[in-house]
Image: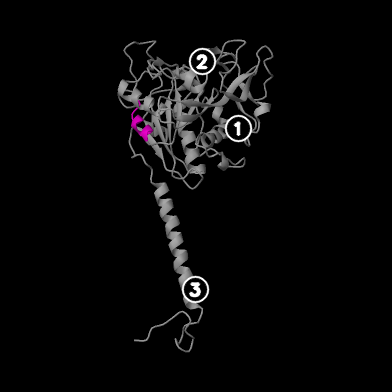
Amino acid sequence: MKTTTLDQTESEMPGVRPTAFPRILCAFVVAALLGLQWSHRLNAAEHPVPESPLWLTYSGDRGPGAGKHIVLIAADQEYRSEYSMPMLARLLAKHHGFHCTVLFSLSQDNDVDPTQKIRWEDKTVTHNIPGLEHLEKCDLVILFSRLISLPPEQLKHIYNYLDSGKPIIGIRTANHGFIGFDYQKDGKKIDFGEAVLGGSFRNHHGRWQQDSTRGIIVEQNKTHPVLKGVRDIWGTSDVYRTYKEGGALPEGCLPLVDGQPLKGRNHDDAVNTELIPLPVAWVKTWTGNTGQTARVFHVTMGSAQDFQSEGLRRLTVNAVYWCQHMEADINDESCMDLVGDYNPPDSGFAYKKLNIVPRKPSFYK
């Protein structure tokens, strides 16, 4: 049988041009490469957490975060984290490629119910956040809790995460996020806000439900990657005090944004000159019992209405990259547009007035 080679002439193989075989070979190579790329995209699109009526999942689109998984925890009663955490998850998945899972504090009826009491109000209260076992394999946790009391088996997942060396972002009330938090380091019980996030809530520095906050970038740290492209930070929540008057952030905290209280809850209200700016966003590191060090970002702004500010969204998303050692992927022109409708209610405890009622997690999808 006569064999053919790639250098055979047109006369030896009638009807086939002499350059056809190299082109066919190239086509096969290209197809194979495209197949590998498509296979990678399929793998990246496979969300690591199964769908459930108890939580929300968002598969990452194309972007620098492809294949990475973020767990966001919405468990506060005041600042509408049940709205803001799904919003952030949609944004991070759609525009930046991260797989996202949103966990909620659920009632006995498996409803998201911010009106649930805390243990200071009812000593019998124990909260429930299904899905905390997924912290074991995620790449980042974004925590927005307030004074919740979890059963030991759920707290264990958080304690293990603190020892994992994986990064943490804490938003607003996360610095007083737990009651009955028994994690110990070197045999001593720690204060989660102070030790892990870099400051616990001490008081409202701005006037609660009266002042709003204008974010001011800290000049000497303006080149930090988390601040890349960040402009015009403003929100309706007031400034927290996280350290004693005359004090400062704990050693190891790098302040990025100061918060100046304004005289009112509108963007262009005048500065409240009776109140000095205090830090509202900083970075630090945390080392747990295994000796593994994690990057930490804490922002004490962050009510659901605050996140209507593109500047605050960019600051937080940049921190998502930085916390995962992905600062090279921070782009000051990357998309921070809201995905879908986002019109969260105001903060506060006037639940009836604000129409805050128990709802299934799917309501917030």
Colour mapping used in the image: one colour
In the rendered image, the vertical position of residue 240 relative to residue 222, given as above or below: above
Which residue lies under the disc numbered 3?
23
For disc 3, the neighbor class at 10 Å (few under 14, some 14 to 19, many from 20) is: few
Q: Residue 311 carries which label?
A: 1
Q: Percent position (x, y) of residue 280?
A: 58, 22
Q: Identify the magenta region.
A: 129-136
Tag 2: amino acid:
Phe
Spatial separation of the CA atoms under disc 2 and disc 3 = 67 Å
Spatial CA distance of label 1 from label 2 is: 23 Å
Residue position marked by numbered label 2 in the rendering = 201
Density class for disc 1 (Cα within 10 Å; few <14, some 14-19, many ≥20) is many
User: Which of the two marks, 2 or 3, is nearer to us in this view?
Assistant: 3
Under mark 3, the amino acid is Arg
Which residue is found at the position 38% from the left and 26% from the top? 158
Element assignment for label 1: helix
Of 150 and 75, nearer the camera is 150
Residue 136 figure quarter: top left
Nearer to us: label 3 or label 1: 3
Tell me which amino acid carries mark 1: Gly
On the image, the x and y values in percent for residue 220 come to 67, 27
